[in-house]
Image (tube, helix red, strand yellow):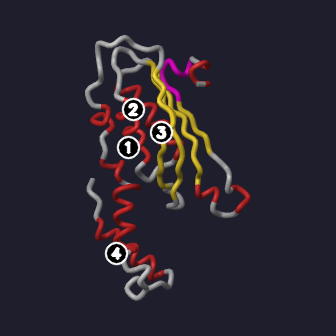
Amino acid sequence: MLHDREAIAAAVTALLRAAGLDPSGDADLRQTPARVAKMWVEEFLAGTTMDPSKILGEPVVGEPDPDVVIVSGLRFHSMCPHHLVPFRGVARLAYLPAGKLAGFGRLADLVECFTKRLTLQERATHQIANAVWRGLGARGAGCVMEAEQWCLALPGERHDRSRVVTAAFVGEMTERPDLKAQ
């Protein structure tokens, strides 16, 4: 799916005008529609054009399987489909190899695939765990995401320091509390 930057820019212009602002008459707003369209296409919608199976690519085979592979500190940002405000955080993903290993950078790219789109944090967490599990034929996989949800933080200072943690485990990871804790 290709995204129409011109249509997005036109929609932003219409939004600004509906808010009583004139992008053609205000120097601060002249380039705003084009900038917003670029940001949306490159940061908030890019994941919709990514194919998780292609991201994982050719796995590494012939290496001894470690007990578990854990990659943490994977920073991400996304856009809430309910309020169209961003959320950002850190993901940790793990899998139990079964003869196939993935490059660490490919795992980071997989997180981007499911977060650079309009999505719920809960949904992305499940999609990432399932993509690793199925894509690598792993014995199990898990994903934990911790994020600052701006739709929760913006409406007042009462929740401005809140963090939302979501976790999804599939396969043998569901039966391993020791690995879930990691």
For the residue carrying disc 4, how many other residues have a C-alpha within 10 Å: few (<14), some (14-19), or many (20+)?
some
| Three-letter amino acid code of the residue under disc 1 | Cys
Q: Earlier in the sequence, mark 2 or mark 1?
A: 1
Q: What distance separates the C-alpha of mark 3 from that of mark 4? A: 34 Å
Mark 4 or mark 2, which is nearer the start of the sequence?
4
Q: Upstream in the sequence, badge 2 or badge 3?
A: 3
Asked if labels 1 and 2 touch by Cβ distance under 8 angstroms, the answer is yes
Q: Position of residue 16 (x, y in %)?
A: 45, 79
| Mark 2 vs mark 1, CA separation in Å | 10 Å
- Is the residue marked by circle 1 packed among few (<14), some (14-19), or many (20+) residues within 10 Å? many
Q: Nearer the viewer, mark 3 or mark 1?
A: 3
Name the kind of residue labelled 2 in the image. Answer: Ala
Residue position marked by numbered label 2 in the rendering: 131
Q: Going 56% across and 21% down the picture, which residue do you hit? A: 179
Residue 113: mark: 1
Magenta run includes residue 170: yes
Which of 13/65 is in front?
65
Q: Amino acid at mark 4?
A: Ala
Residue 36, above or below 21: above
The magenta region covers: 169-175
Q: Which residue is mark 3?
A: 74
Q: Which mark is in front, 3 or 4?
A: 3
Does residue 128 sit above or below 47 in this rendering?
above
- Residue highlighted by disc 4: 10
Q: Label 2: how many residues lie within 10 Å, few (<14), some (14-19) or many (20+)?
A: some
Which image quadrant for residue 9? Answer: bottom left
Q: Secondary structure at mark 3?
A: strand
Q: Is residue 139 magenta?
A: no
